[in-house]
Image (cartoon, grey):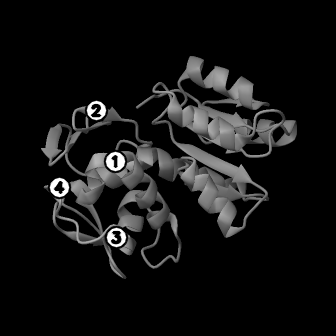
Amino acid sequence: MSEGPVLVVDDEEDIRSLLVAELARDGLAARGAATGLEALDLARRIHPSLVLLDLMLPGLSGTEVCRRLRSDPATAAVPIIILSARGEEIDRVVGFEVGADDYVTKPFSVRELLLRVRAVLRRVPAVAPKDGTWALGRVRLDTGSYRVWVNEQEVMLTATEFKLLSTLSARPGRVLTRGQLLQEVWGMPPELSTRTVDTHVKRLREKLGAAADQLETVRAVGYRFHAEPGGSGGAG
């Protein structure tokens, strides 16, 4: 993954400057962008290690910026944390559906945000098996380059989606509870009540396309990845 600076995208100069300064104080290089178009241009040039993205931007919205970052192979796997004054569940779900790795509501604690940044950065390289390539049914993963293919067609996943897939596929046939996935993939307490896992599984299943049936929902428990197609008992 990229070792570039954190990209802070916020049209409020005081917030942007504060976050750039606090990230630097925490040992992380950072650059700022005030608009969505500036952020997209900068992201292609500096290859950021992570993007802090405000949703309420002039011109191009943060949601659209997120979509474009995810659709560009050069930035598709860069972790994105959304910053938003809108904290309703539906807003969070939409944020995750367009490809965010985390969602922080304004006003926020700078200390908490820095902890979330560190948590997301930690899980980018932390795939379950050691580096290598392995295939399960229609799916092939390369943990060294963070690449995934379905029927030899490459699929672009976010860092979190890759971590989720690699965690599940490293233990084919075994059910992992939502709590286990929260802990292993997101570094969150297993007892936390959140739709984060379900939202990411839904998006991952859509991206897997022809291999979606290998990712099974075990109702009221969690999820299981099958080594062969057609092993799913349900994809709810």
Along the polypeptide, which appears first: circle 1 or circle 4? 1
Do tag 4 and tag 2 residues touch (Cβ < 8 Å)?
Answer: no
The quadrant the C terminus occupies is bottom left
Q: Which residue is mark 2?
A: 153
Q: Give whichever of 7, 149 is nearer the camera.
A: 149
x then y, percent, for residue 232: 22, 66
Q: Mark 4 sits on what residue?
A: 229
Q: CA distance from mark 2 to mark 3?
A: 30 Å
Residue at the spot x=58%, y=17% of the render? 45
Residue toward you, 51 or 36: 36
**Circles 2, 1 touching at the beta carbon (< 8 Å):** no
Cα separation, mark 2 vs mark 1, equals 11 Å
Secondary structure, mark 1, is: helix
Q: Which residue is mark 3?
A: 180
Front: mark 3 or 4: 4
Amino acid found under the numbered disc labelled 2: Gln
Q: Label 3's element?
A: helix
Dot placed on the residue nearer the N-terminal end, 4 or 2: 2
* Mark drawn on residue 168: none
> Which residue is located at x 79 percent, y 36 percent?
17
Residue for badge 1: 209
